[in-house]
Image (spheres, rainbow, N blue to C red):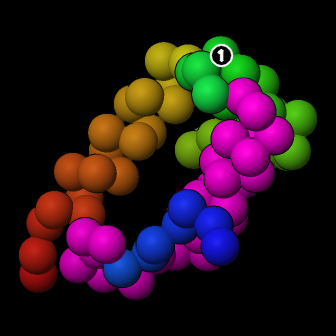
Amino acid sequence: MGYLQPVQAAVAEATPWETKLAGAIEEVFGGGRHDLPGLVEGLNELGIPAPGGGLWTPEGFTTAIAELAAAGKQED
């Protein structure tokens, strides 16, 4: 069983990109990388695009995750 529990705190369905990102994060963590630089490197190696289509950076990852978290707290 994986770590992903998509209904933990969601107020809306995950987008396909969010679902793919969550699976990739789980894969990177499962491969033994548990720090931010390793996670970012793993996402780039897996070909998961950052928002806007570029490569992930540590700063870009933390910003994107904060934005996703903030959007997930908003109710319609």
Q: Nearer the viewer, residue 53 or 2?
A: 2
Percent position of residue 41, x then y: 77, 24
Q: Based on the displayed image, in which of its 4 quarters is residue 53 positioned?
A: top right
Residue appearing at x 68%, y 61% in the figure: 23
Does residue 31 appear left or right of residue 61 in this picture? right
Q: Quadrant of the C terminus?
A: bottom left
Left or right: 41 as drawn, with respect to 59: right
Mark 1 packing: few (<14 Cα in 10 Å), some, or many (20+)?
few
- Residue lying furthest front: 1
Give the position of the N terminus as an image quadrant: bottom right
Q: State the image coordinates of residue 40 (x, y, percent, origin top left).
A: 68, 27
The segment highlighted magenta reads: 8-33
Amino acid at circle 1: Pro
Eyeballing the image, is 24 above or below 2? above
Percent position of residue 34, x then y: 62, 28
Name which residue lies at 31% across and 39% down: 66
Helix, strand, or loop for circle 1? helix
Residue annotated with mark 1: 37
Image coordinates of residue 32 in percent, x first then y, are 76, 33
